[in-house]
Image (spheres, rainbow, N blue to C red):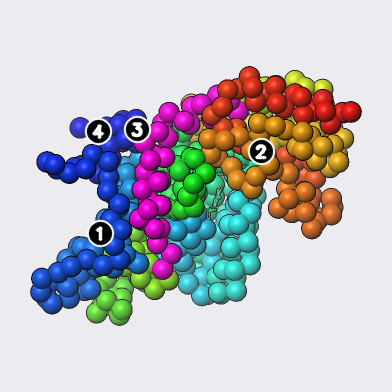
Amino acid sequence: MKQNIETLCVQAGWEPRKGESRQQPIIQSTTFKYDTSDQMGRLFDLEDAGYFYTRLQNPTNDRVAAKIAALEGGVGAMLTSSGQAANFFACLNICTAGDHMITSTCIYGGTYNLFGVTLPKMGIEVTFVDQEASEEELEKAFRPNTKLVFGETLSNPGVKVLDIEKFARLAHGHGVPLIIDNTFATPVNCRPFEWGADIVTHSTTKYMDGHGTTVGGVIVDSGNFDWEAHADRYPGLTTPDESYHGLTYTKKFGKLAYITKATSQLMRDLGSIQAPQNAFYLNLGLQTLHLRMPRHCENALKVARFLHDHPQVAWVNYPDLEDDSQHALQQKYLPNGSCGVLVFGLKGGREFSIKFMDNLKLICIATHVADCHSCVLHPASHTHRQLSDEQLLEAGIAPDLIRMSLGIENADELIADIAQAIEAAEK
Ligand SMILES: *Cc1c(COP(=O)(O)O)cnc(C)c1O
């Protein structure tokens, strides 16, 4: 029977048998025992499925990954040590030196560096596109060696909503998959596979963990992209892998080709697996994800409305506000609410913003978003403090932009904290 998201959050991935622990156990072991040399050999040939070394796979991780795959509606998933590793591996799994990829400019700063600086150093060319451009305009970014298109459901920090159907149409028209970073929306608020995305990634560090305890990431495969139909473009999946005695992923693993290659090749060679202990914490977070997301959205909308009507606030962006530029897309892709993050600017420039933040009491200054504690960050004074106001604007960040992540505390108390901090900054 098809289960709903609430049940999947709690129960998917681990089905204990008679006498086994109800909560999923942490398998804190690097290695796994076998009886014969042949049994072990078959694992190394990918002839049998099984565990042999935790750098590649661990049962705790796989159960949590299976839960996330179920939440997203995918066929398989792999946990990584961070969201950065997830986005890196998701691209590297089908891109190599000499290849090209396309990404929206509205992406997380860490991903922006990865795509703008580090991948080019490895010989992968990246074209950045304006996600609000017309399809005719976006068509121009494709090249014969383009291997994938990338975007974020809700961008960090701008909270722009990606038109996933438009991007899927463009990608598929050129025979390449669409990879979506679904970190801010989570599968509770949006499941990109239902709109045509092929691969989904997350920084599980954010809402999935939800308590600010554990850095982690995940890659989920929908199993829908037909690699064989574009075999020449994806030789890594459709031709023999010499490091596994000439096995071909698409032939051997079918719909699981992409995620199996990511595990058996990239994780084997590059490491970056999530620690089983961290996967356990992540699972605790996932068990309440469906309860927390509505509250994050409710609090953010109340705060957004308060800021919207406050005379000291210059502007506020939050997709769930009726007059927000992203509202139509939010209504389509995230009708139950977007996320708990919003951005706004105060009148009075950098100095006023700093005074405001220093006077917040409940809402803390932290380089984080999307956990149960409310927090705030001012890129011009923190992550991007080396830039002048002109340079900030060039980077697409308004000098007065404040990013606020609303937790699951009492909304009236959060609003009162903001009100008193603005008042204190006015003195
Ligand atoms: C934080 C974040 C990342 C990077 O994740 P880490 O877990 O910090 O490595 C990637 N994408 C988005 C949208 C993020 O918010």
Amino acid type, mark 4: Lys
As drawn, 153 above or below 111: above
Q: Nearer the viewer, residue 300 or 283?
A: 283
Q: Nearer the viewer, residue 333 or 265?
A: 265
On whether ligand 1 comes within 8 Å of the CB at mark 3, the answer is: no
At 60% from the left edge and 74% from the top edge, which residue is drawn? 121
At 77% from the left edge and 33% from the top edge, which residue is drawn? 359
Q: Which mark is residue 254?
A: 1
Q: Position of residue 1 (x, y in %)?
A: 20, 32
> Within 10 Å of the Cα at label 1, are there few (<14), some (14-19), or many (20+) other Cα atoms?
some
Q: Earlier in the sequence, mark 2 or mark 4?
A: 4
Cα distance, mark 3 to mark 1? Answer: 26 Å
Q: Nearer the viewer, residue 37 or 269?
A: 37
**Where does label 3 land, which residue?**
5
At 75% from the left edge and 23% from the top edge, which residue is drawn? 419
Q: Nearer the viewer, mark 3 or mark 1?
A: 3
On whether ligand 1 comes within 8 Å of the CB at mark 1, the answer is: no
